[in-house]
Amino acid sequence: MPDLRFVIPRQEINREAFASSSPDFNRRSEMMNTDRGFKCRVTNIIRLTELEKLFQLRIVEPSERALFRFKPGQFLMLELPGYGDVPISISSSSTNHEFLELCIRKAGHVTSALFNIEAGASVAIRGPFGSSFPMDEMAGNHVLLVAGGLGIAPLRAPLFWINEHRDRFLDVNLLYGAKEPSQLLFTWQFEEWEMINHIGLHTIVEHGDAEWKGKNGMITDLFNDISIDVQKSYAIVCGPPIMFKFVCSYLDKLGIPMNRMFVSLERRMHCGMGKCCRCMVGSTFTCIDGPVFDYWSVMNLKEAI
Amino acid sequence: MIYKVISKKEFRAFVDALVSNNRSYGPQQVETDRNGNPVYQFKPVQSVDDIAFDYTATASSAKHFFLPFREELSRFSFEPAESDRLPHTDLELVHGMENGWIQKINYDAEPVVLIGLRPCDISALNILDDVLLNGHFPSPYYLAKRKNTFVIGMDHLPLPDCFCKSMNHHTVTTGFNLFCSDIGDHYYLSINSSKAFNFLKEFESRDPNDDDNCLLVERRKMIQNGFTTEIDVTALPTILDIEFDSPVWEKWGNKCLNCGTCAMVCPSCYCYSLTESFDTSLKGAKREKQLYSCNLVDFAVVAGGHNFRPKNGDRLKYRYYHQHRGFAENGNQQICVGCNRCGRACLSGINPKDVINDLRMEKESCLTCVSSSPGRR
């Protein structure tokens, strides 16, 4: 028989009590939705190219749907039960509270499994995590968006935001480069962006085919087409690491201040909340301080690009 | 904090009462190494006689009671019971869809007594508290285990390769329930929790008198002066920043075998990976957390195959960067406590003292006036 005087009592951790124990109310929601994902229904899957699909999700529980709010540039952890979770940037409008759209490339273990599911399947999302593009700070200025390949996916959310608040911005230019014409994403929206939202859209491909009527070359060639007012311009750059180097150093030479250039970085992530340390860049977490960094921080981070 | 003095005999009776009524772990000799020195580990103990109170240091640290190698975080059930199902939403009624799965989470932790933790081990737990509880997104899994653990700390004379004094972790004031300092035939107890105080009420102890206090200070001094290994950590975070492209990393990186042992034995390494796997019945799946090491080759590999840290040196540098510079998450605080477990466990003889001294040489040789740092007497 145990001597009850010396038995250490068991202390239960109640999830709700734990979440509300934080002195900072803003941290409450951070704690609520990190260990348990929001259950989502895949309502539609659009095949964009051979390797990319656009997933449309809807959070099942109305209360959770009301809780999930994000800012342009943030990402979420998409979990397919049994396979694992992946960090995916949100490419739908931040004012669309009904549906989420995620542009996913078939690249790894989880995303390959995601390519086999059909509309109607259930997945879980955790988040939103990370920093966002400072859209309010950008208001009243020219905006230059530079996307390479899949880099258009994280840029779609700020683009939606700009389109919905178009009167707050001066000239908006989108430079978009891809390897081949067939790899250009969201082509069905190009006309809408150009004609309705008055966004200067410039596309370029490395290897054009017979039907391609646009330009051939690298994305930096597009800078000759536009004039940039460096005093009143903000730039958002997203693409493969090699593109960051060329585009950012070009814009830097042009004279755009470093704190007005924003990049969205990509790293391996396992938690999204600064615990697994997989996404470290120098001494900073991509998941908490990023994925959106200004160019000044990127220059100061070791091994960033 | 309340201080008491207890005789060693009475202390054994106290530990015995705790051990025989709770799940307890204490240091035990498990093997001898190739030099004939005993190897200790924290093992389950049933009575006070199982505990080696005179142990030197355990090969693995005490963090595994809080961060196990494998930990099940949650469980998915694909065939949920009727009672677990969510009510149908309007959308489901339209499409006639069924609930696909149910996620279950519990923060299970049994009360555990840990006996004989060293000050550096307890310091490491405090650092883990900082990272896992005080930062962004506190971890309830860790909190459950931390709350349900009764920690009894013990001081010890430094080993020849300990350098916790340089890291300022050779004494500890928080993070334990009870801490014992050896003062001859008595233990000087620092009581830091009501639980410990209540248990001690049942045993004969007295308030410390002047002699005991003198003995305690002497003991602390003896420990303080017993360190033979020291590392000069002055401005180390800055030096690590400056020396990011130093050839030292490649030199030591070429020796590294990428086995990840250093992170496994480290008391404050907490990086992990998440994996999910299906049950063999295909009726459920589990989400598991595994401790990981930044020296393993695929630590920073992203989907598509790009490795952000392709070279051994890059990964070794990253580990030292985390250990001795600290990350933003824990206020840029160093997380190394100076127990030198990684140095002892390393198969190719990489130890923090040599690497950091090498790095400092690299830096200070550029200066015309080389300061006489205590680390290189």
Image (tube, coloured by chain):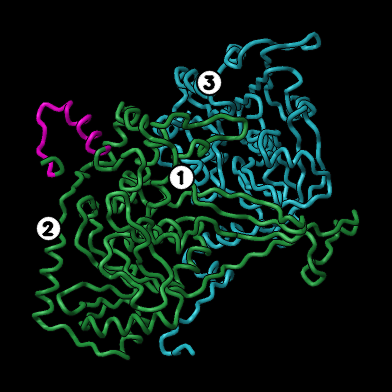
Chain colours: A cyan, B green
Q: Label 1, on which residue? A: B293
Spatial distance from mark 1 to mark 2, Cα to Cα?
A: 34 Å
Q: Amino acid at mark 1?
A: Ser
Q: Amino acid at mark 2?
A: Asn
**Vertical comparison of A68 with A141: above or below:** below
Q: Which residue is situated farthest in the top direction here?
A: A210
Can the viewer see residue A62? no
Q: Label 2, on which residue? A: B225
Is A276 on the left-hand or right-hand side of A121?
left
Q: Which mark is residue A247?
A: 3
- Check disc 1: other Cα within 10 Å, few if <14, some if 14-19, many if 20+: many
Q: Dividing the picture into quarters, in which one does residue B343 lie? A: top left
In front: A141, or A53? A53
Horizontal and vertical percent position of residue B10: 26, 85
Horizontal and vertical percent position of residue A175: 63, 22
Q: Tell me the subunit letter for badge 3.
A: A
Looking at the rendering, the stretch of residues picked out in magenta corresponds to: B355-374
Q: Which mark is residue B256?
A: none
Residue at (59, 30) in percent of width and height:
B305
- Look at the numbered discs 1 and 2 and tell me whether their residues touch, using CB distance below 8 Å: no
